[in-house]
Structures are given as structure tokens and as C-alpha cells.
């Protein structure tokens, strides 16, 4: 595995999924947002909440798996 991951330019892991049969594209989250308009009339949507990277990624179930820890160490 060292040969595979030590040469990787980028690795992608889906930390949201807690099982291999659970997808990651259909999030069951209703994100609240506000609409802001600037002086020139341009509109922007701003999310009212910000994800917690440490909780959502670093402490995710996937990162407790030994092979994931191994990948992270080798990169």
C-alpha cells in the first residue's frame, strides 16, 4: 500500500458515509441561507451556518479505520 499511496497526487475519501452501501451525494440536510443584494443589484446567497471541519472530517467514522490512518500517515 505504501507504493500506491506514496505516489498519489490526490486521494479522495467520503467521510460522510458510515457504510459502503451509503451514498454521499444525497445529503439529508436542509441548509438555511439568506439572500444579499449589493448596491449594483448583484445577488448572493450566504449560508447561515458553517460546517465544523474538525467534527465533520477529522472526527468522522471513516478516520477511525486503520487503513485510513495508514493512508494519512503515508501521504
Image (cartoon, grey):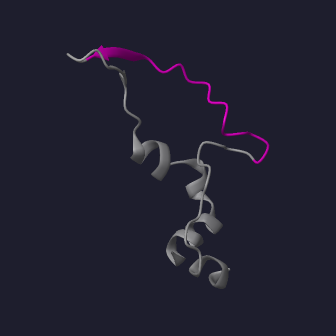
Q: In this view, does 31 lie to the left or right of 44?
A: right
The image shows a total of numbered marks equal to 0
Image height of 42 relative to 56, above or below = above
* Extreme-right residue of the structure: 21
Q: Horizontal and vertical percent for residue 6?
A: 57, 81
Q: Quadrant of the N terminus?
A: bottom right
From the viewer's side, name the closer residue of 52 and 65. Answer: 52
Q: Residue at x 60, y 58 (%)?
A: 12
Q: Which residue is drawn at 20% across and 16% down?
A: 39
Residue that extends furthest to the front in the rendered view of this protein: 40
Q: Where is residue 51 in the image (x, y as percent from the top left)?
A: 41, 36
Q: Residue at x 65, y 68 (%)?
A: 67
**Residue 5 horizontal/vertical position (percent):** 61, 76
When the figure is inspected, residue 39 is found, relative to residue 15, above or below; the finding is above
Q: Is residue 57 found left or right of 7 in the rendered image?
A: left
Viewer-side residue, 10 vs 51: 10
Q: In which quarter of the image is residue 46?
A: top left
Examine the residues drawn in magenta and state their main secondary structure. Answer: loop
For residue 30: magenta? yes
Image quadrant assignment for residue 36: top left
Q: Position of residue 61 (x, y in %)?
A: 59, 49
**63 relative to 19, above or below:** below
Q: Give the range drawn in magenta.
A: 20-37
Write the residue at 52% across / 69% down: 72
Amino acid at each position: 500500500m505504501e507504493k500506491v499511496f506514496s505516489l498519489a497526487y490526490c486521494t479522495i475519501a467520503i467521510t460522510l458515509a458510515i457504510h459502503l452501501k451509503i451514498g454521499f451525494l444525497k445529503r439529508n440536510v436542509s441548509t438555511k441561507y439568506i439572500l444579499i443584494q449589493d448596491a449594483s443589484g448583484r445577488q448572493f446567497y450566504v449560508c447561515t451556518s458553517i460546517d465544523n471541519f474538525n467534527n465533520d472530517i477529522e472526527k468522522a467514522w471513516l478516520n477511525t479505520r486503520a487503513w485510513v490512518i495508514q493512508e494519512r500517515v503515508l501521504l
